[in-house]
Amino acid sequence: MAAGKQIRFLDLFKVCEHHFGKPRNSGSSHYIFKMPWPGDPRVNIQNDKGKAKPYQVRQVLDAITKLMEAKSKEPQKQTTSLTGALAGRRPAKRR
């Protein structure tokens, strides 16, 4: 698989922040993003001379796929608001 062969680290970092939030970094070269599930796929990326490591790009893609699948299985919440319900009604005439 050629995914991630020439991906810039900064681009991968931005994608991770968008999908997973701010990373944990304790002064090392690794950026660890918290997943909403235990175990793999984990997202742990590291800058390799400005490029992302290909296996880490695959991990990110796997995690995004899992996240999207989980979101698509969530029941859709139906919200109704009083203003939305009344939007089509005409005001009552005063006598």
Image (spheres, rainbow, N blue to C red):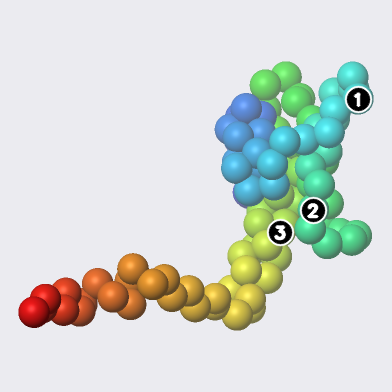
Residue closest to the eye, 72 or 65: 72
The reply to whether residue 26 is in sight is yes
Q: Marks 1/3: CA distance?
A: 24 Å
**Badge 2 amino acid:** Met
Q: Look at the numbered disc 3 and give the secondary structure of its residue.
A: helix
Task: Tell me which residue sits at (89%, 19%) in the image.
Answer: 27
In percent of width and height, residue 92 lies at 16, 79
Residue 26 falls in which quadrant of the image?
top right
Q: Do labels 3 and 2 touch, CB within 8 Å?
A: no
Question: Considering the image in quadrants, where does the N terminus appear?
Answer: bottom right
Of the two numbered discs 3 and 2 in the rendering, the one whose residue sits closer to the viewer: 2
Q: Marks 3/2: CA distance?
A: 12 Å
> Which tag, 1 or 3, sits closer to the chain's start?
1
Q: Look at the numbered disc 2 and give the secondary structure of its residue.
A: loop
Q: Do labels 1 and 3 touch, CB within 8 Å?
A: no
Of the two numbered discs 1 and 3 in the rendering, the one whose residue sits closer to the viewer: 1
The outermost residue toward the front is 95
The reply to whether residue 90 is in sight is no
- The residue that mark 1 highlights is 26
- The residue that mark 3 highlights is 62
10 Å crowding of disc 1: few (<14), some (14-19), many (20+): few
Question: Considering the image in quadrants, where does the C terminus appear?
Answer: bottom left
Q: Look at the numbered disc 1 and give the secondary structure of its residue.
A: loop
**Badge 3 amino acid:** Asp
> Which tag, 3 or 2, sits closer to the chain's start?
2
- The residue that mark 2 highlights is 35
Task: Tell me which residue sits at (72%, 36%) in the image.
Answer: 22
Q: Is residue 71 above or below residue 40?
A: below
Task: Tell me which residue sits at (60%, 42%) in the image.
Answer: 18
